[in-house]
Image (cartoon, helix red, strand yellow):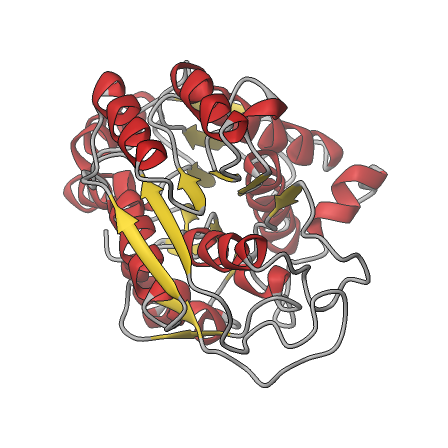
Amino acid sequence: MDLPENLRRRSFLLGAGALGAGAALAGCTGNSSKDDTANVAAPAASSAGGGGGNDAIGQKVVVGFSAPAADHGWIGAITKNAKAQAAQYSDVELKATEGTNDTNQQISQVETLINAKVGVLVILPYDGKALTEVATKAMDAGIPVVNLDRVFDSPLAYRIWIGGDNYGMGVAAGTYIAKAMKDKGVSSPVIAEIPGIDSLPLTQQRSKGFADALKAAGFKVANRVPADFTPEGGEKAASNLLQAAGKIDAIWNHDDDQGIGVLSAIESAKRSEFVLVGGAGSKNAMDAIKADNGVLKCTVTYSPSMSSSAIKLARLIGHSKGMSDLVEKEVPTSITLASATVTKDNVDQYMQFGFTS
């Protein structure tokens, strides 16, 4: 395929030698896992660089943590990973609030952490726009904010943003499907898409990346039925899709949690003529990819290991250190994690990052 430069840059992760989201921060972390959802970084030997000796025990850092309610496998893994990562360090005290999808309650929780004078705040806002003011208040009070995933409206509201690459997910999924179609000799494939909530910018970015990668290969989306990131929504959307399209060559489902319902609908319809690509990188999906006995052949990552990295970054900021593989003395202001393509050929490399849907 003749991919444009920006697509080539993002799609280099396709293949057995690819490194994933966690590995994108390899200079700062050395990831290992305690269980299937807690992807924590094992403290490594002291290393040279901008920070130097970053895992050496230092001054105690109190890290406040706030995130939405764990009503979704990915969000649940975010909180578990953050707690597990903090527990790796004797010089980190984590003050985690109870997850909530009530914006006003999350604002109140963050204000409580500000009043408690925590050293650094890690916030995954339920609504980035609504939480911008209280995050800015924290920054004004001298408390650095690590903005996790859902971005605040103003760069003045955070010291660093870390999150996934939604556009890159779409590119990775589209690149995999385009290659699969060309390898099978399918010149005019029927390609379908089951996104999450269509009104969200992240969904729009994922779909844009998917469409761009397919367009570069001369393909396009023929059928598109949005869901809502839940298994129930995924099953309903997939059922509607399968009823509307008598033949499909490939489907990209944006989210492995809703993918549980998608797979259920496919099984009920007894359809198997297509390849299915997932999104996010759940352990359930990876187990199915490794078994290689169904339609699910690939997933593209959006790993909740980012919360482990957020805790490590908060600790570095608290210690006034930089990332050990960069020459700068401070951590960057923005880190976008790569979306890796996970297939049966490299799935074992990513199992430790899988979360339970």
At a point 67% along the width and 62% down the height, the residue shown is 323
Q: Please name whichever residue, 155 or 23, is drawn nearer the observer in this view of the structure.
A: 155
Q: Please name whichever residue, 61 or 212, is drawn nearer the observer in this view of the structure.
A: 61
At a point 67% along the width and 36% down the height, the residue shown is 213
Residue 119 in sight from this viewpoint: yes
Q: Quadrant of residue 217?
A: top right
Image x and y of residue 235, in percent: 20, 33
Does residue 355 lie above or below 336 as drawn?
A: below
Does residue 243 lie above or below 189 as drawn?
A: above
Q: Taking 157 as reference, is 52 left or right? A: right
Q: Please name whichever residue, 158 or 182, is drawn nearer the observer in this view of the structure.
A: 158
Look at the image and tell me in which quarter the N terminus lies: top right
Which residue is outermost to the bottom? Answer: 45
Residue 286 in sight from this viewpoint: no
Tally of marks: 0
Does residue 80 lie above or below 260 as drawn?
A: below
Image x and y of residue 144, in percent: 53, 39
Q: Please name whichever residue, 157 or 32, is drawn nearer the observer in this view of the structure.
A: 157
At a point 20% along the width and 26% down the height, the residue shown is 236
At a point 52% along the width and 72% down the height, the residue shown is 345
Image x and y of residue 73, in percent: 25, 47
Image x and y of residue 2, in percent: 83, 42
Q: Taking 348 as reference, is 154 left or right? A: right
